[in-house]
Amino acid sequence: MHNVHQTMNSQDKADISPASRRKPIIIATFAALGAGLTASLTSVALMAIWRLMGGVPTPVELFGDHLLKLLPAARFVDMLVAFSPHSKTTPLGLALLGMIGLGTLLGLPYAAIVRVKLPATGYRPASREWLVALLLGVAMTAAAIVLFWGETAQNFLGLPVGWAMLVTSLALLADFILYGIVLCIAYRFLLPKRQVDGSSTKASERRQLLARVGVAAIGAGAAGGTVGLIKGLLSNYTTYDGSETFTSNGFTAPITPTSEHYTVTQNVVDPVVNLAVWRLEVTGLVARQGTYTYDELQNLPSTSRAVTLECIANGIGGHLISTAIWHGVSLRMLLDKHGGSLPGARYIAFYSVDSYSISLPLDEVLAVDPILAWGMNGAELQTRHGYPCALSFPAALARRIPSG
């Protein structure tokens, strides 16, 4: 009898059609993709909240900033032309869609690793599923921090560099852990369930339908919330980018009025700096490190200087050139106040709240003695010109570098 039973089992397995074998795989695939999409949309909604409420850069912005550093200048110009007139929002939008698509596809390896047997027993994920989801979130966080480490120092509220890096890293961890948790729960909810003993078929089907509708509602709500948050953020879109300074009746004013000063910005939305958290930091290879609040910066000995700025993209006869009176603190004086640079110092680096950073030879910088300007044409700096503090270089090194 035992041998006969084995033969019958083997025969039954042989009678299973290829379509029947593929059905569980197809079901698991669609469930994984649906769970991945829901998790992605939910995570993106949290990213938008961090960005709007805490000034924390989104992974999309971190990716964009990282990519721009790697692009050759000619390729960058080609992209500006290709995506015109939406040279900033279109690439960011495509990167956002790419991130959502990648998050959706990550549901497939998750499903392959957890290998939930169908039909599933219940809606509660097993320990193995929780563990895989959390490890996935941690792995995604680690990858993002390693890849974007140079960009994590930015914070659009003006947090000091160290705090900005910590806050950005913690936000990434929260984003991707949320992704893993939602992926884990949504995948379980979307899988077909084994009927519980004592329950009717209709009741079981009703519970499964409600679970799937719930997952769809979470995804739709997250998508709608994200769209609303992005619209709120873009309400402050930098529409003035590329504004030019024109002559009046063929006459060029020796000092350009602030309202007519040309402006070119890398930002889609300029930082809204909170002076309660913003600090000017003097760190690195200096004898004595230190920080200054905005009021402390303004109370330092200051000077004024007329500086003509010209955009690197300004052509012959172009209008991306202006002259203003910049008022602030001499960089040389500030370094002397901190005991000067140490013998090993060769370069000086500047970091801003909007992720712009640059390093230049220290000797060349000190030779022209730039100023850390907090005033422009007798008034406080405007946001579009680098509020609360802009680094103003005269002569050949002239360029605006907002100071973080």
Image (spheres, rainbow, N blue to C red):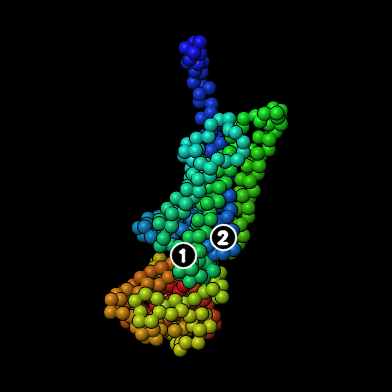
* Disc 1: which residue: 165
Indicate the position of residue 257 as horizontal and vertical percent values. 52, 79
Measure the C-alpha gap from mark 1 to mark 2. Answer: 14 Å
Question: Of the residues shown, which amino acid type is indicated by label 2?
Answer: Trp
Q: Is residue 96 above or below residue 28?
A: below
Crowd band around label 2 with a 10 angstrom C-alpha radius: few (<14), some (14–19), many (20+): some
* Disc 2: which residue: 50
Crowd band around label 1 with a 10 angstrom C-alpha radius: few (<14), some (14–19), many (20+): many
Q: Quadrant of residue 259?
A: bottom right
Indicate the position of residue 214 as horizontal and vertical percent values. 66, 42
Furthest residue toward front: 1
* In this rendering, position of residue 383 left or right of residue 337: right
Q: Residue at x 50, y 87 (%)?
A: 299
Q: For numbered disc 2, what is the local secondary structure?
A: helix
Q: Can you tell which of label 1 and label 2 is closer to the viewer?
A: 1
Q: Nearer the viewer, residue 97 or 34?
A: 34
**Residue 377 visible in the picture:** no
Q: Nearer the viewer, residue 63 or 368?
A: 63
Q: Residue at x 55, y 51 (%)?
A: 178
**Residue 152 visible in the picture:** yes
Q: Is residue 231 above or below residue 192?
A: below
Indicate the position of residue 371 as horizontal and vertical percent values. 42, 81
Question: Of the residues shown, which amino acid type is indicated by label 1?
Answer: Met
Considering only order in the chain, which callout, 2 or 1, is on the residue closer to the N terminus? 2
Q: Residue at x 51, y 70 (%)?
A: 159
Q: Residue at x 62, y 30 (%)?
A: 194
Q: Nearer the viewer, residue 364 or 136?
A: 136
Q: Is residue 132 above or below residue 9?
A: below
Indicate the position of residue 246 as horizontal and vertical percent values. 49, 73
Furthest residue toward left: 343
Q: For numbered disc 1, what is the local secondary structure?
A: helix
